[in-house]
Image (cartoon, rainbow, N blue to C red):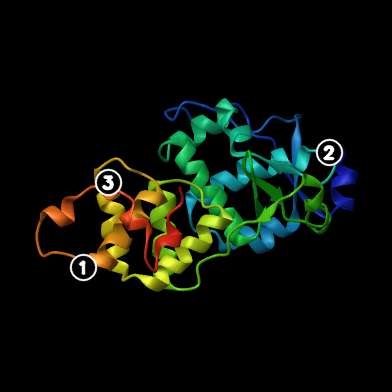
Amino acid sequence: MSDDAGSRDGAARVPAPSPPHPSNREFPGFPERGQYLALPASFFSAVLPAITDLVELKVILHALPVLLAKRGSPRYIFPGDLLADITVVASLRRLGEPAQVLAQGLRAAAARGVLLQVARPEGELFVLNTPRDRAAIGSLGQVRPSPPQPTSPVRAAIFALYEDNIGLITPLVAEQLAEAARAYPAGWIEDAFREAVTRNKRSWRYIARILERWAAEGRGDGETRRDSQDPEDGDKYTRGRYGRFVQR
């Protein structure tokens, strides 16, 4: 892309990332001539000043060049597209397990409005949030909008628990989590997730059965037989007011 094209698009020109350097080496500087990438000027005026989380910033800066380089509309990526890049993986590994760091950063970018999160049968994808790409989302097929952001502390907590312990939230699961947040005390929800993780039963089906059992039978003060019983024993926990939360 020429300098003239970049100025016509109102985009600030930034150097293309150089190959990764070991942490103990000083960056040698940008080359006099080399490949440059164009980012929208609004990224520097409206997005960058508001970001305080390094995970979000890194993921956005890795995702934007990939999306902006794509042709056609809508421009989108799957998380696996970024994890296939060894430079991205090396960068994210400095902050934790790359797949988890990427998932956290993509969620933050979608919450900020930089990306649009779309659920598809083969997995979540992320679309660049521009008028052209928003208008073309329907061409991806039968897609569902990404789950709305939590609007209360309890909903925010259950969303975070699910994402931290199970994975990305689909629209269907988002509805179930929101209903559970209204139906159960926050402490119950946290304890149910903890019990499921302890038993290595990381699924909403299992957690919902724990909550259903506690709602039907109450919670003991100690480690009683009723409290320690595996909620997958039998079908009685799928019945009752909250049985619809349980997915078979």
Relative side of 155 to 68, left or right: left
Mark 2 residue type:
Arg
Residue occupied by mark 2 = 71
Residue 74 shows in this picture = no
Which quadrant of the structure image shows residue 49?
A: bottom right
Q: Residue at x 46, y 51 (%)?
A: 247
| Residue ID for mark 3 | 233
For label 1, the residue is 218
Q: CA distance from mark 2 to mark 1?
A: 57 Å
Measure how far apart labels 3 and 1 are at the Cα level: 17 Å
User: Going by the image, does 40 lie left or right of 185?
Assistant: right
- Quadrant of the frame with the N terminus: top right
The correct choice, above or below, for 243 with respect to 89 in the image is: below
Question: Disc 1 residue type?
Answer: Gly
The residue lying toward the viewer, choosing from 100 and 91, is 100
Which-is-in-front pick, marks 3 and 1? 3
Q: Amino acid at mark 3?
A: Asp
Res. 148 image quadrant: bottom right
In this rendered view, identify the residue nearer to me: 228 or 117.
228
Number of numbered labels in the structure image: 3
